[in-house]
Image (spheres, rainbow, N blue to C red):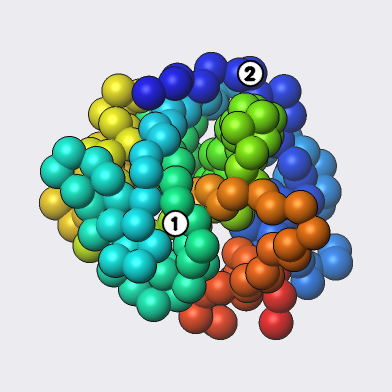
């Protein structure tokens, strides 16, 4: 259960703009976005954790104790050919979420929305950093990595979040679930990364990534149309 404590050095303003649903807003004050990113850096408490498991892609079963059967055709196709998986969780903590709520209650709606978007950007960057840290270790063992896939993408049901929390040991970094199966703190993620044996001369199959793998086409932060 390696724990990830790398610092968050910046929050990407372009991604913050996207998560705020402002990609087409040409006249929006850019300084407000930059200020939200700076505030996010001060408030974020970045943490991550990951666990490596054997995986049976035929039955879509993670060899945890007890085993974890993954539901969904798209996630199954994404992990086809993998014999190991990494289950991970990342969070930016509660302080940034509390400030988002406080600003909204004070009527600072634009600032609240932008800080919320900066927090989303930050947790995705933490997960990106975890992938970059993990990749060399897996490469030395002869494995390539598929991009991370989270419950709620495609047809992978959110109802499997309790198993994700259990198998990636998310509680070790303070991540849990509400009664409605929402992650707590809210700016947290869980995800799975498939690992496949790299064979010389064999081309890895391509799968849809990110927004392209999600069926929610009306999402305001969607990167593709």
Measured from the top left, where is residue 157 in percent x and y? 30, 68
Would residue 216 appear left or right of 60 to someone viewing this image?
Answer: right
Of mark 2 and mark 1, the one earlier in the sequence is 2
Measured from the top left, where is residue 10 in percent x and y? 73, 29
Please tell me whether mark 2 sits on a helix, a strand or a loop: loop
Would residue 154 appear left or right of 146 to someone viewing this image?
Answer: left
Determine the residue positioned at 39% across, 62% down.
57
Res. 217 in view: yes
Q: Name above or below for residue 60 compared with residue 5.
A: below
Measured from the top left, where is residue 183 in percent x and y? 31, 46
* The label number, if any, that marks residue 150 in the structure image: 1
Determine the residue positioned at 78% across, 72% down.
24
* The label number, if any, that marks residue 40 in the structure image: none
Residue that extends furthest to the right in the rendered view of this protein = 26
Q: Nearer the viewer, residue 65 or 91?
A: 65
* The label number, if any, that marks residue 7 in the structure image: 2
Measured from the top left, where is residue 49 in percent x and y? 43, 28
Q: Quadrant of residue 93?
A: top left
The reply to whether callout 2 and callout 1 are in contact (CB within 8 Å) is no
The span from disc 2 to disc 1 (Cα, nearest Å) is 23 Å
Q: Nearer the viewer, residue 220 or 152?
A: 152
- Considering the image in quadrants, where does the N terminus appear? top left
């Amino acid at each position: 259960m390696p724990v990830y404590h790398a610092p968050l050095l910046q929050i990407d303003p372009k991604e913050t703009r996207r998560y705020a649903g402002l990609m087409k807003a040409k006249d929006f004050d850019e300084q407000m976005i930059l200020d939200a990113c700076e505030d996010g850096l001060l408030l974020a408490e970045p943490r991550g954790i990951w666990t490596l498991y054997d995986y049976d892609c035929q039955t879509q079963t993670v060899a945890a104790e007890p085993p974890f059967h993954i539901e969904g055709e798209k996630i199954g196709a994404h992990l086809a050919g993998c014999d190991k998986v990494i289950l991970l969780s990342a969070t930016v903590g509660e302080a940034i979420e509390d400030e988002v709520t406080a600003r909204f209650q004070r009527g600072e709606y634009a600032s609240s929305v932008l800080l919320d978007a900066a927090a989303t950007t930050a947790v995705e960057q933490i997960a990106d950093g975890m992938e970059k840290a993990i990749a060399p270790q897996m490469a030395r063992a002869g494995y390539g990595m598929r991009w991370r896939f989270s419950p709620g993408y495609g047809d992978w049901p959110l109802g499997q979040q309790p198993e994700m929390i259990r198998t990636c040991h998310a509680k070790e970094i303070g991540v849990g679930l509400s009664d409605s199966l929402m992650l707590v703190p809210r700016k947290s993620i869980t995800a799975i990364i498939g690992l496949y044996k790299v064979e010389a001369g064999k081309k890895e199959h391509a799968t849809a990534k990110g927004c392209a793998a999600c069926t929610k086409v009306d999402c305001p932060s969607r990167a593709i149309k």
